[in-house]
Amino acid sequence: MAVPFEERLRIVKLVSEEGKTKSFVAFTEGYSRASVHSWVSKYLEYGEAGLEKKKHPPKYSQQIKDAYLASVEVEGLTVNAASKKFNIPQQTFYEWRKERDEALPVEVKRIKKLNKEKKAREDLQNLRKENRRLKMENEILKKLQASTPKRKN
C-alpha cells in the first residue's frame, strides 16, 4: 500500500530536521531502510515535490525528446546534470539516446563510427606529436644543463 505524502514528509523531517538516522527512523516507524533512504534522497534533491506520488511517467513527443537531447549535447551536460536541470530521470535520457541511435539508418551509424575512429586517430596523432616535441625539449634542456658550468656555493 502506498504511503501518503504527509507521512513521507513527516518521516523525512525526522531525519532532516530532528537529526535522527535513517536506520533508526525506519526501525521505529516500521518502514524499510531503503524506503526511508529513497524518500530522504528525493526530498534533498527535489524538495517536497520529490515526495509526491507519481501516477505514471509523462509522455514526451519525439520533438521534445530530440530538443532535450540536442540541448544536452550542445551544452555539453552530463546525463546527471541534465537530469537535474530538466527534472527527468537519468534512465529516461539513456533510453531516448538509445532509441534515437537505433532509429538511425545503417549508413549514418557507419559514418558516426568512422567519425569517432577518425577523431581517436587524430587525438593519438596529436599526443604522439606532443610527446616528440616534449622529448626534444627535454634533450635540449639536458644538453644545456650539461654545457653550463656548475656554480659553487
Image (spheres, helix red, strand yellow):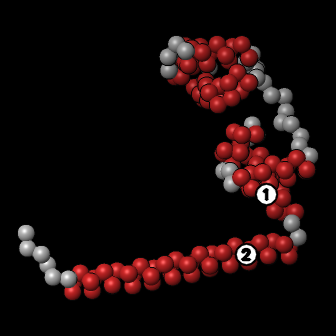
Q: Which image quarter: residue 25?
A: top right
Question: x, y (%) of residue 24?
Answer: 51, 18
Residue situated in front as seen by the camera: 138 or 46: 138
In the rendered structure, which disc, 1 or 2, sits on the residue that comes first in sequence? 1
Q: Residue at x 77, y 72 (%)?
A: 112
Question: x, y (%) of residue 18?
Answer: 52, 13
Residue 47 lies, with reference to residue 92, above or below; the image says above
Q: Does residue 38 show up?
A: no
Q: Which image quarter: residue 144?
A: bottom left
Q: For mark 1, what is the residue?
A: 98
11 vs 58, left or right, is: left
Label 1 crowding class (10 Å Cα cut-off): few <14, some 14-19, many 20+? few
Q: Quadrant of the C terminus?
A: bottom left
Of tags 1 and 2, the one toward the viewer is: 2
Residue 50 lies, with reference to residue 78, above or below; the image says above
Residue 55 lies, with reference to residue 90, above or below; the image says above
Q: Label 2 sits on what residue type?
A: Asn
Label 2 crowding class (10 Å Cα cut-off): few <14, some 14-19, many 20+? few
Residue 94 lies, with reference to residue 134, above or below; the image says above
Secondary structure at badge 2 equals helix
Q: For mark 2, what is the residue?
A: 115
Q: Residue at x 66, y 50 (%)?
A: 78
Q: Label 1 sits on what residue type?
A: Lys
63 vs 117, left or right, is: right
33 vs 134, left or right, is: right
Q: Residue at x 71, y 27 (%)?
A: 50
